[in-house]
Image: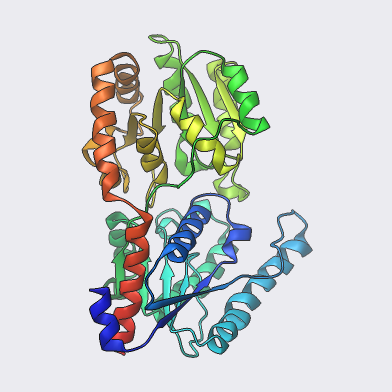
Amino acid sequence: MLNQLNINLKKTITIGLDTRDLKLATTGTKTYLTELINELKRSNDNSFKLVMFGSVWPPYWGNNLLGKVFEHVSFFIWKQITLPLKSFFSNVDALICTDYYLPLIKLKAKHIVVFHDALFFDHPEYYNPIWLKWFKLIAVNGALKADAVVVPSQFSFERLSTHLPTLKSKMQVVYQGPKSNEIKSSLSDASKIAMDKIGDVPYILHVGGLEKRKNLPFLIKALKEIRKKVDVKLLLVGRPNPKIFNNSHEEIMKTIDSCGLQQEVFFTGYVPDNDLPMLYKNSILYIIPSTYEGFGIPILEAFQQEVPVAVANNSCLQEIGGDAVAVFSPFVEGELVHIAVELITKESTRNELIQKGKQRLKHFSWEASANDFKIIAQNLLKSS
């Protein structure tokens, strides 16, 4: 299909990719951009040329008000002035932005934007009201003017279609793949410290920011009941969300104290990607108790490392996990306790899910994702 479209177009397509988010993002969106870049670079398709646009200035991460204002102004200038000019003078045919934000002015290139979820519509309470107004003014208007909007799941497609029905005709679902990290023989200091504290006791793993939607206090309360039946600990990999409206760190610590689990719940903070495969591999069970997710890369990462997975029965989690995950209500503690104990203690149940996970993983790859982006770009240019 790609070759046929290339014959019709009779030209090499130049794809521009905004890579500024590599310096800003630290979790799922960074993984998304990193893996997409790597796959597009690996491609042997001569009908495409990749041009990457990265900002020279590093983003500001501090709490100084002037610094935050400067960061917002710098970001606006990058997206609305610098990026479109770079794209224009590089003769880009299709510009891809994977961080929700597009230039509002189109000089030449077709515009493709990735919306990872509709959380800002479904849960506005997680955001600063001023930032939310800014987001809707810039990001939503950019999406409305875009030529194509990519979403990572059918769930995100449906939620965005509900809030922005005019986007439905230009939205396309492009599934992601897992991270391509290999198991290393050594861990970072943060991971080593946590693993030493856990010792030889089996542990349940969760990887992700300490955000309210991750529902981690629920997981901690369930752990207290799980430990009445099996000796297991909990390892939380990730750091608190810098946005105070969605930061669950304080509630998590209070829950640990109230449950008396100070010696059973451990944190690594943010760790290098190369730590993750070993942390997954050594875990007894991976649990996602989230009340909202746009895709759920950790599901695939757990499948990769042959770890059984249990997920909440909402948003996209069952869509991605299929029949390879155990499912529970993120509001019914007893359901999670029962499933966790069974997956920890019954080897036959564990092995069944592990084998299903290996098969399910075959449906997701970054090679397929990159090819989907190419096809979207080609079809946009063909129809223009």
Q: Quadrant of the C terminus?
A: bottom left
Q: Position of residue 57 (x, y in %)?
A: 72, 68
Q: Position of residue 61 (x, y in %)?
A: 70, 55
Q: Quadrant of residue 327?
A: top left
Which residue is at the front of the view, 18 or 100? 18
Residue 269 vs 8, above or below: the answer is above
Can the viewer see residue 268? yes
Residue 254 vs 211, above or below: the answer is above
Answer left or right for 282 relative to 11. right
Q: Quadrant of residue 341?
A: top left
Q: Position of residue 88 (x, y in %)?
A: 54, 88
Q: Quadrant of the N terminus?
A: bottom left
Residue found 63% across the figure and 81% down from its top = 82
Residue found 49% across the figure and 40% down from its top = 182
Can the viewer see residue 262? no
Q: Position of residue 201 (x, y in %)?
A: 50, 13
Which residue is at the front of the view, 73 or 233? 233
